[in-house]
Image (cartoon, helix red, strand yellow):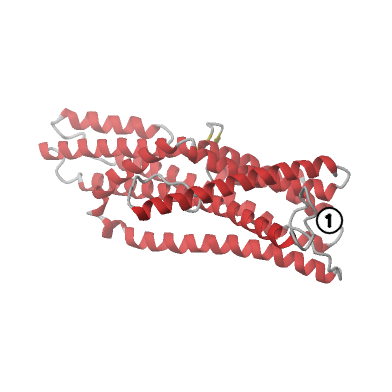
Amino acid sequence: LNNIGISVIKDESPGAKFTKIKEKTKFYFFVTSFILVQISSLISIVSQYENLEIVTSNFAAMVFLSISLTKISSIMLNKKKLVEALAIAEELFPKLKSEQEELGLEQHLKRFRVLERFIKMIFVSLFLLYVLAVAFTAYVQKSVIVKMSFDLWFPFDEYDPKFYPFVTLWLTLKEAGAISVFLGSDLLLFSFVSLCKFYSANLRAQMIHLKKDLGSHEMSEKIASIVNMHESILLLIHEIGSIFSLSLFGNLCGGSILICTVCFQVLDSSTMENSLQFAPMLLCDFFQILFICHCGEKLIEANEKTLDAVYDIDWTGTDDKRIGHFVLLMLIRTQQPNALTAWNIFSIEYKLFLSVSQKSDKYFR
């Protein structure tokens, strides 16, 4: 949330107020910059529609920033649901602390931090690789003409020495902001999915321990607490789906269009050097779609494991009928697919990533 510039924590201390002002400034800078670039790109497309390279590069910029705006809007429009989801996660977390060592929570948190650094390194490396690819192309072609990353329209001469440093700085901050929005939104999604995964693992561990003496009244109460915890997990997954539904839909549609646009630029390029400029962006698009599909797949996998654990409970020989009712209730709930969806149109899973890749490949064959 700090990467995006959104605050949901209520804290009135002086330090917190300063942090909120800083986050609001970052948020409004991102949104204003994205909208200005959209307008500039649109004017460039309309005014230079004969130049195919300028049209495709500006269109790609518009799509990329549209995805960023969708990600910010999805979270801003669902801030109340985000607070509710955080409250549910905080309520469930103490129940998880008792089994941290058994579930390997500390090891997973270390892996998460490593993954976060790896993702940031990938994005930064690909961004730098794009710049280096442009510089390498200019060197190979013996060109020393100064160019912007995108041929945007400005109401002044952007190559004028008075304006060029500020324009370059603004474009760099804008591009870094777009990457920050992608990272912030996707890592927030991954954090929630990781929590759901471990809450589900905790639930399965409790069900396995119930096999020993299910007939007692104490076991009946434990199953009731398990059912309540399962209900909270399902509610958390539902809130996550509501928060990120618009973001995932815009991400998939925009990402697919972006892949097609970048592939077209690669095929349209006359030389290999020009094609190298677009390879990092293409890799970044595929990696980002794979990442959100991975999050959706983990939720589906956790739900299937929970369903198997419920089936393994040996409750048929017990005298307490409530246990059978509780088990039946959990079976009914686990039958419903607990998956992330993009506006209830696409189910977010590995199959979707393979479908996007396959259709992109067929489009250019």
Please determine whether, in this image, residue 165 is positioned above or below residue 319: below
Residue 216 at least partly seen: no
Disc 1 marks a residue whose amino acid type is Ser
View extreme (front): residue: 162
The residue shown at (14%, 31%) is 320
In the rendered picture of this protein, how many numbered marks are placed on residues? 1
187 or 290: which is nearer to us? 187
The residue shown at (58%, 51%) is 288
The residue shown at (13%, 31%) is 319
Left or right: residue 215 versus residue 192 is left
308 or 32: which is nearer to us? 32
View extreme (left): residue: 217
Please determine whether, in this image, residue 20 is positioned above or below residue 76: below
Left or right: residue 84 versus residue 26 is left
Q: Position of residue 207 (x, y in %)?
A: 25, 44
Q: Position of residue 231 (x, y in %)?
A: 31, 35
Q: Position of residue 145 (x, y in %)?
A: 84, 65
Q: Residues within 10 Å of mark 1 (few under 14, many from 20)?
A: some
For residue 82, which quarter of the picture?
A: top left
The residue shown at (71%, 67%) is 132
Left or right: residue 69 versus residue 11 is right
Please determine whether, in this image, residue 353 is positioned above or below residue 126: above
Q: Secondary structure at mark 1?
A: loop
Q: Which residue is mark 1?
A: 269
Q: Position of residue 175 (x, y in %)?
A: 63, 55
For residue 179, which quarter of the picture?
A: bottom right
81 or 30: which is nearer to us? 30
160 or 178: which is nearer to us? 160
Residue 7 at least partly seen: yes
